Amino acid sequence: MRKRWILAGLLVVLAAGGFGLWKNANREIMAARPIEGASLKPIAFDAEFVPAAVEGALNSNPFLAADANGTMHGDGGQSDTHLAAGPFGKGLEVRSRQAGNGMPRQCSTFVYRSDGKPIVMCGGLAGFRMVLLDPDTLEALAHYDLPIRPSSFEAFVKRDMGIMMNDSSGGAYMFLDNKDRLVFANSQWVVQRLVAKLKGYKWEFAVEKQWDLKPHVPNDCFNWNNWFPSGECDKITTVMPDHQGRYWWTTRKGRLGTLDPDSGKVSVVLLKDEEIQNALAMDIRAVYVLSDHAQYAFAAEKGGKPVQLWRTAYDRGTKRKIGSINQGSGTTPTLLGDKWITFADNADGRINIVVLRRNDGSRICAEPIFKEGASATDNSMIGWGRAIILENNAGFTSAYEQKDWNDVAGGVVRVDVREHESGCDTVWNAPLKVPSVVPKLSAANGIAYFYSFDLVKDADGKETQDWSIVGLDFKTGEQVIKIPTGRGRKFDNNWASMSIAPNGDFYAGMTGGLVQVRQKRK
């Protein structure tokens, strides 16, 4: 009996020790620590390139943070365009911040408060984490942890990172509103509104308000507290405000809902047998939803119920491609000007950039892009003026699953809509290999920024990657700047976004944390 008690005591000690190690590895170190493996190579740029503004306009939303500061893709139209000038020329410095404390934690989404401070979403096995940063020191001023995602737990148990990488739910598609409040749906089917406040000399996050959507979304998911689910599991992927302040939300399995943040009233409809895995676009007339079968426009009845205005099916191909999450479009719909909406389909052979009229969903063009049999994307396009810029993700799986980096097909294309809507034309193709980034255009200097790699040998002679931020000329597609960031997996972007702050500081998420590029301070 005594031996049993000793054994039980040892198990308790080991469990407590394991929990302590996990807790320590998962905690956020507030001070900025650089990511190991940072590049020492110099920044290269084309001295003959003259930065120049490019004409276009944001689709502003009165309930989002100003300009392009409120979402992963910037504005309510999901343009992936910022008004500030991005990095170019002499006097730049590259700094990094390691996220977490040893346990892998990738920073993926950047939004900016009215005081200029970034709020960054950094994901990991233990759950997503919202971090308020000091842009001058890269110190974490405050952080807020979200609960573990069911897909993360399942990936850990089954030792399959693909389960986690193919899940866009849990808070990545968050938004910052016009009052500096962060809104998202966590992995427990709860929409939360978070505020960051300075108390004395210390910043802290607090939940201002929250709404439980479990009564409206099936939630019998495999998780640490539910090992034997028997019902349906669906997950909330995105939350966005419309131009009346109503919250719209979607789920992976085709649910589209509204939430009145004042009354708490919820309405929901189901797009039967369809999936939604990207964000929503908004204008004053409609909410634009892209499923794995069709592009939709919806509006809300007086009571909040979503009502379909139009539906336009697209070519979803015959299978899911490497470089895509599911068999369907991998892009968030992007609004162009006042009249058009664009996305990419999943056609066999070569995917198409599709442009529709927003008033009725009628098609202007479906322009084939990239090479036959090596054409796929799971990232949104840049949309500015009449121009669409899109990268090719064909051949890339994830930073944790990629076996042969030569499989990454590469390519960036610009397609323009003809002024009189008679079709679309390919303006240029660039050979740049861009495995997986959410790119950004600087409207102020005319540079479209991507994330790329060069294959090299490490000190042991093993193949690895040297990663860089690469800027292409909006007009020609020619490379005009290359900013080396670092070597190896920690500097792999792995489907995360890049972003330009209102003051011109440039951020890029990666598996080890984040990188900032800025003008050197005197």
Image (tube, rainbow, N blue to C red):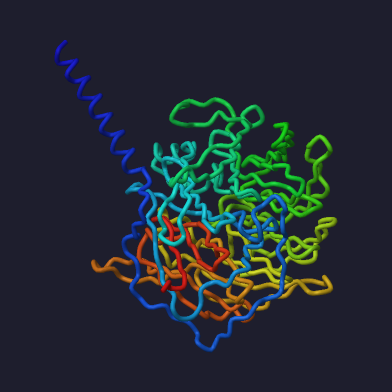
Name which residue lies at 55% across and 61% down.
Answer: 438
Name the image quarter holding residue 254: top right
How many circles with numbers are drawn on the protein? 0
The answer, for residue 371, to whether it is visible in the render is no
Q: Is residue 427 above or below residue 243?
A: below
Q: Quadrant of the N terminus?
A: top left
Spot occupied by residue 25 in the image (x, y as percentages of width and height): 32, 43
> Quick one: which residue is furthest to the left in this view?
2
440 or 431, nearer to the observer:
440
Is residue 250 or residue 244 the one in the foreground? 244
Above or below 519: residue 104 = above
Side of 278 relative to 435 (left or right): right
Q: Quadrant of residue 188?
A: top right
Q: Nearer the viewer, residue 70 or 276?
A: 70
Q: Position of residue 420 (x, y in %)?
A: 84, 73
Which quadrant does the C terminus fall into? bottom left
**Left of 459 or right of it: where is 450?**
right
Establish if 16 lies above or below 302. Answer: above
Residue 238 x, y percent position in the rendering: 62, 45
Q: Position of residue 220 (x, y in %)?
A: 55, 28
The answer, for residue 58, to whether it is visible in the render is yes
Point 37% across, 59% down: residue: 489
Q: Is residue 68 left or right of residue 417?
A: left
Residue lying farthest to the front in this orientation:
200
Residue that appears at 43% across and 47% down:
201
Outermost top residue: 1
Residue drawn at x 60%, y 69% as measured from the top left:
84
